[in-house]
Amino acid sequence: MTITAPERTQTAHRVPLSLVQPTPPPSWPPRYVRPLRIVPPLTKAPLVPRRPRSTRITRRGRLVLTLTVVAVIGLLSLVASRSPASHPGRAAPAGSVVVQPGDTLWAVAVRADPHADPRVTVDRIVRLNGLADVSVRPGQHLRLPDH
């Protein structure tokens, strides 16, 4: 048995080196080429009903909310302390008072001007209202002196 090499049917054409153009040199620095990442195939996730998201608040949001609540409470307490209803025995007009049960002229004088000497204030209330003595009755209206 004889083995022979196959005959060449095509002849490769050789191009003379003078016709081949050189490739341009690479630009430096070379661009970074990100390596390929293998990603697992996509699968269908089971349909699970999601809970509605609760409202999230940031740390700064909590601080602003807290300061706002404190400011509102402070303003409300300030307004409430200035109202005439918070002072028993004082009527709406600043220059008069209605005597409450258990009140004395001394107590009325201290409430009328807490920084003054009560003896002087009692004497001024007696003269201003034309009282015969220092006794007062519940429900009696008294005018108060200016401070």
Image (spheres, helix red, strand yellow):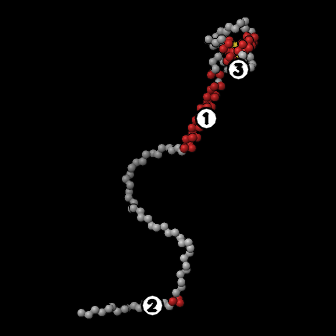
Dot 3: what SS?
loop
Q: Specify whether residue 77 is in view.
A: yes
Residue located 54% across and 76% down the image: 26
Q: Tag 3 or tag 2, which sits nearer the N-term? A: 2
The residue carrying mark 3 is: 115
Residue 16, given in percent of the width and then of the height, sits at: 50, 91
Q: Is residue 44 left or right of residue 106?
A: left
Query: Measured along the vertical axis of the image, is residue 50 above or below residue 35?
Result: above
Front: mark 2 or 3: 3
Residue 14 percent across, percent down from the top left: 46, 90
Label 1 to label 3: alpha-carbon separation: 30 Å
**Label 2 belongs to which residue?**
13
Type of amino acid under label 1: Ala
Residue for point 55% across, 80% down: 24
Identify the image quadrant of residue 43: bottom left
User: Mark number for residue 71?
Assistant: 1
Q: Is residue 47 left or right of residue 139?
A: left
**Foreground: 72 or 1?**
1
Q: Residues within 10 Å of mark 2 (few under 14, many from 20)?
A: few
Q: Is residue 64 above or below residue 88?
A: below
Q: Quadrant of the C terminus?
A: top right
Residue 110 lies in what quarter of the image?
Answer: top right
Residue at disc 1, secondary structure: helix
Q: Residue furthest left?
A: 1
State the SS at label 2. loop
Which quadrant would residue 73 be assigned to in this image? top right
Q: Between residues 45 and 31, which one lies in front from this camera angle?
A: 31
Q: Is residue 120 above or below residue 10?
A: above
Q: Quadrant of the N terminus?
A: bottom left
Q: Residue at x 41, y 62 (%)?
A: 39
How crowded is the residue under tag 3: few (<14 C-alpha within 10 Å), some, or many (20+)?
few
Q: CA distance from mark 2 to mark 3?
A: 120 Å
